[in-house]
Image (spheres, helix red, strand yellow):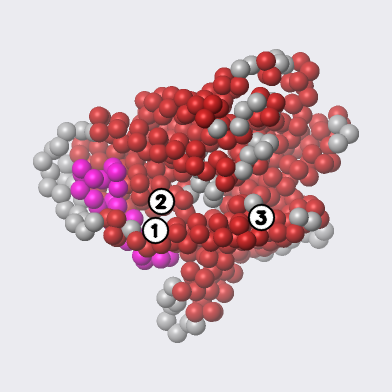
């Protein structure tokens, strides 16, 4: 392959990344293995093109992936199949990230969506936490981490108008906590989130349709516990005059609710009509929706709508996707390393480790709620933790439990990691906007919340063993 000119390198990486989602869509809708292999190869190429421009800390993951690849090649006869499977998991993650980034790109230029965020941030104190945690949940279904950046910025902007620095700090902290917990609760159930996609992919017999309702209950538990703790620990009223929104925020949120309805109905319809998995429906429907949405937005003066949409699509592929080089490389490596690591460790754990089939299933389910946030404190990405640990566990069929119980435990633990790990994007964003350290924005703000929500998640996951 000839060398790529440095000036066109980022654009080339963006084009290859777009090729990953295109071939993954073809694989999902045709089932032809050649498309899956092509997607895996393109994903590896995209990550290779990103390597020269990423932060040095990301290269550690590349080195680990290379070492594990060499280990698998030298010790296992079926190494090639395992490598393709791991790269294909990485391609799936890249495709989902690309699809959601396209929708986020369209949303961030929508004045109606931005106004929804302002309305939430300007609610009166007695309603502000509820508005931001529920609104954060809804925004996160579409924007993922972008919801923290958007709503957090608007929250800081709103609280900055308070002349009392103590009150300003308290309000900022409370609003950021609400946004964090709203985002994290989506990780329990959202069909667009990495947590549900990765978990249902690697847990044998699991699928989103079966897990959705029990996992929505998990999300409700998180939201209710967060609201309850806020009511207990919120600071006393200061008497400071409040100036903000007076119109009902449920009315002002109508554009966001309509968008969510379109996404959910569109993805569900495509899933039912074509029979593809939900992730395949997301990969196709969400980018198409983003393109249509951009087309409907007012273009710059004297520019036809079609030309505006074409330029936005070109800029997204050539400029915005390459700007996510660190995120894409980290996400791919987390899935790849976890998959290869699980492939290598599973037979070793079976031969030399404890017999996990003898462990009571309820104990394994309970363990998965806690082990993900604990490893998150050590810097382990949840994608890596789940991809590495689940292959070592007995399958749900071997344990005699419904796959949904294990899915609910894993996604619940993933959500808790999203509020506490100082290495996750959600906590880092909240810390930056709140003007505190990542450790403070994680366990400092959410330590008691994590214990309470974790206990509820543990009880609910174990209960599902006997309910389903």
Q: Earlier in the sequence, mark 3 or mark 2?
A: 2
Position of 17 relative to 231 (above/below):
below
Q: What residue would you read off at disc 2?
A: 138
Tell me if 117 is positioned left or right of 103 in this view: left
Q: Earlier in the sequence, mark 1 or mark 2?
A: 2
Q: Pointers 1 and 2 in contact (CB under 8 A)?
A: yes
Asked if one can make out residue 126 in the rendered structure from this viewpoint, the answer is yes
For the residue labelled by badge 1, is the local secondary structure a helix, a strand or a loop? helix
Q: What residue would you read off at disc 1?
A: 257
Q: Earlier in the sequence, mark 3 or mark 1?
A: 1
Give the x, y percent position of residue 299.
45, 77
Crowding at label 3, few (<14), some or many (≥20) Cα neighbours within 10 Å? Answer: some
Q: Nearer the viewer, residue 303 or 452?
A: 452
Crowding at label 1, few (<14), some or many (≥20) Cα neighbours within 10 Å? Answer: some
Q: Please, which residue is most extreme toward the right here?
A: 77
Give the x, y percent position of residue 101.
54, 57
For the residue labelled by badge 2, is the local secondary structure a helix, a strand or a loop? helix
Q: Distance between the Cα atoms at labels 3 and 2?
A: 25 Å
Q: Please, which residue is most extreme toward the bottom here?
A: 302
Q: Pointers 3 and 2 in contact (CB under 8 A)?
A: no
Image mark for residue 276: 3
Q: Distance between the Cα atoms at labels 1 and 2?
A: 8 Å
């Amino acid at each position: 392959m000839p060398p790529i000119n440095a000036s066109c390198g980022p654009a080339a990486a963006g084009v290859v990344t777009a090729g990953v989602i295109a071939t993954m869509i073809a694989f999902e809708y045709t089932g032809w293995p050649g498309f899956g292999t092509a997607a895996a190869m393109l994903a590896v190429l995209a990550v290779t093109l990103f390597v020269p421009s990423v932060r040095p800390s990301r290269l550690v993951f590349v080195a680990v992936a290379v070492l594990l690849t060499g280990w698998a090649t030298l010790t296992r006869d079926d190494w090639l199949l395992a490598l393709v499977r791991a790269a294909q998991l990485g391609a799936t993650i890249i495709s989902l990230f690309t699809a959601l980034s396209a929708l986020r790109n369209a949303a961030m230029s929508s004045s109606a969506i931005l106004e929804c965020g302002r309305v939430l941030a300007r609610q009166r104190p007695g309603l502000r936490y509820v508005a931001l945690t529920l609104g954060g949940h809804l925004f996160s279904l579409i924007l993922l981490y972008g919801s923290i950046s958007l709503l957090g910025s608007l929250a800081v902007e709103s609280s900055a108008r308070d002349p009392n620095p103590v009150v300003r700090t308290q309000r900022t902290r409370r609003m950021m906590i609400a946004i964090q917990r709203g985002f994290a609760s989506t990780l329990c159930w959202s069909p667009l989130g990495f947590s549900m996609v990765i978990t249902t992919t690697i847990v044998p017999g699991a699928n989103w349709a079966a897990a959705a309702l029990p996992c929505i209950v998990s999300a409700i538990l998180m939201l209710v516990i967060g609201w309850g703790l806020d009511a207990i620990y919120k600071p006393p009223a200061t008497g400071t005059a409040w100036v903000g929104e007076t119109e009902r925020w449920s009315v002002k949120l109508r554009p966001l609710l309509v968008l969510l309805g379109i996404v959910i109905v569109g993805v569900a319809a495509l899933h039912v009509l074509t029979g593809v998995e939900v992730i395949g429906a997301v990969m196709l429907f969400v980018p198409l929706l983003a393109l249509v949405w951009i087309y409907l937005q007012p273009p710059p003066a004297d520019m036809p709508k079609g030309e505006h949409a074409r330029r936005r699509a070109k800029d997204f592929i050539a400029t915005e996707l390459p700007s996510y080089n660190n995120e894409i490389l980290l996400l791919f490596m987390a899935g790849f390393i976890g998959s290869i690591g699980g492939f290598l460790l599973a037979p070793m754990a079976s031969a030399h480790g404890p017999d996990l089939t003898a462990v009571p299933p309820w104990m394994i389910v309970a363990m998965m709620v806690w082990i993900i946030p604990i490893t998150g404190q050590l810097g382990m990405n949840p994608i890596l933790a789940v991809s590495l640990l689940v292959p070592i566990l007995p399958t749900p069929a071997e344990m005699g439990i419904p796959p949904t119980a294990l899915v609910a435990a894993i996604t619940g633990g993933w959500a808790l990691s999203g509020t506490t790990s100082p290495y996750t994007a959600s906590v880092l964003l909240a810390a930056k906007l709140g003007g505190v350290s990542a450790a403070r924005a994680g366990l400092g703000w959410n330590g008691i919340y994590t214990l309470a929500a974790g206990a509820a998640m543990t009880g609910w996951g174990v209960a599902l063993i006997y309910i389903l």
